[in-house]
Image: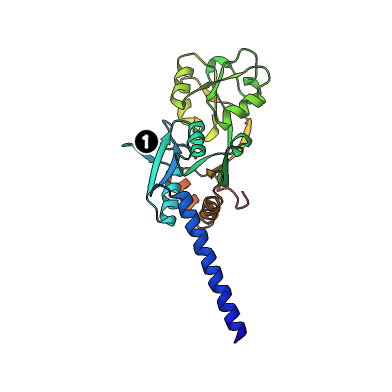
Amino acid sequence: MKILKTCGLLLTLLVANGASANESAMKELNPTGKLRVALVFAPSMSIFFVVKENDKPRGVTADLAGALGKKLNIPVEAVLFPNSGLATDALEAGNVDVAFMPVDEERKKRIAFGPNYVLGESTYMVTAATGAKTVEDVDKAGTRVIGIANTTTIRAATRTLKNTTISPVPSVEEAVAALRDGKADAFALSRDSLPTYVKQVPGSRMVDGAFQQIGIAIAVAKGKPAALAAVTEFMDEAKKNGTVRKALDAAGYEVPVAPLTQ
């Protein structure tokens, strides 16, 4: 009888602790009655970027945001940014509740990352005039390299370029315009994003090789342990149950889902 009472008490405590953790997560993720999710848009979709269609986002991260809202039973409000640097600022300031973005050490100082949903790499798109065929060819004195301001990609390119420097631009659209107008020679971005933009700049190409391999992950603000635990549980489940695979397939990407350990 005592054993049954003890088991019953333990079960009650476990249920109570679970309910308390869920309540804490909801408070941290849902301070406004909506799940405000930072999404980064560009003219063309990628495994990270969404596109805007009738002012609504479409893409991998938009689908994942919807799945998270459904799991938590919270309506989702997509908040769109032209680059991940601005999304990081908004998450850190508490203006959004969740974000998806590339991971790097600089961002880890400011926000809390959950698991990666996919792995990507960064390389360069170059104009025909450069004659560059590899990442190493870009790193020559006089090459005018550009990247999106305050992103993991521009920080990685800055670290790896030894013979030239990289200049920031606010958005992908402006970067492509600079290449097309002869104001830049090379543009640093994720490899999966570049094919569409290569078509927009006659004679341009992607170089061989990469200067960065990186995870793209779900994130919350620092100091919200229950929220971090909740989004970590969501992403682990989404990788196991096919939610991430479905989002990638719907966007036309055959890249593998990030391993469960990441």
Residue pictured at 43% horizontal, 55% vertical: 72
Residue 95 appears in view: yes
Q: Residue at x 44, y 30 (%)?
A: 82
Quadrant, the N terminus: bottom right
Q: Is residue 76 above or below residue 167?
A: below
- For disc 1, the neighbor class at 10 Å (few under 14, some 14 to 19, many from 20) is some
In the image, farthest residue toward the bottom: 1
Image quadrant in which you'd find residue 136:
top right
Between 141 and 24, the residue placed more toward the observer is 24
Q: Is residue 146 above or below residue 59?
A: above
Give the residue drawn at x 49%, y 63%.
19
Position of residue 3 in the picture relative to residue 239 (left or right):
right
Q: Judge by depth and name the residue closer to the eye, 5 or 142.
A: 5
Residue 111 rendering spot, x and y as whole percentages? 56, 40
Percent from the top left, x then y, of residue 234? Answer: 51, 54
How many numbered discs, if any? 1
Q: Amino acid at mark 1?
A: Lys
User: Which residue occupies the extreme right position in the image?
Assistant: 162
Mark 1 highlights which residue? 52
Q: Nearer the viewer, residue 74 or 260?
A: 74
Q: Position of residue 96 (x, y in %)?
A: 45, 41
Residue 109 located left or right of residue 243:
right
- Colour scheme used in the picture? rainbow
Percent position (x, y) of residue 98? Answer: 48, 44
Q: Is residue 208 visible?
A: no
What secondary structure is found at the residue carrying circle 1? strand
